[in-house]
Image (cartoon, rainbow, N blue to C red):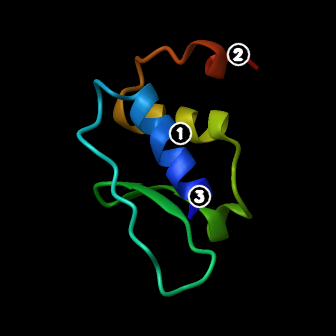
Amino acid sequence: MLRAAYIAQELLTTFEEDVYGITLIPSEVSGRFQIRHEDFMIFDRKRDGGFADIKTLKQRVRDRICPEKNLGHSDKK
């Protein structure tokens, strides 16, 4: 849960003007972690083969909710 809280805080900080909030929902399935926007699955730990780094998660969220947003250092290869 600590990793999920860290990711949520990073996304809220990066997208503070673009998102209303982030909800962490405990799962009955151990190890489940997903990021969704409306009905679209941005990231699924099981589907994507483990946790992605925060840079990748920020890019995926950006691409879905505000593709024009510059992520600064997270956009650099």
Q: x, y (%) of residue 7?
A: 54, 46
Q: Which residue is label 2 attached to? A: 76
Q: Which amino acid does label 3 sit on?
A: Leu
Q: x, y (%) of residue 40?
A: 38, 56
The answer to whether residue 73 is above or below residue 42 is above
Indicate which disc, 3 or 1, sits on the residue closer to the N terminus: 3
Indicate which disc, 2 or 1, sits on the residue closer to the N terminus: 1
Q: Which amino acid does label 2 sit on?
A: Lys
Where disc 1 sits, the SS reads: helix
Question: Cα distance, mark 2 to mark 1?
Answer: 14 Å
Q: Would residue 37 appear left or right of 48 to someone viewing this image?
A: left
Q: Which residue is label 1 attached to? A: 60
Indicate which disc, 2 or 3, sits on the residue closer to the N terminus: 3
Res 3 → quadrant: bottom right
Q: Which residue is drawn at 36% across and 27% down?
A: 66
Camera-near label (2 vs 3) is 3
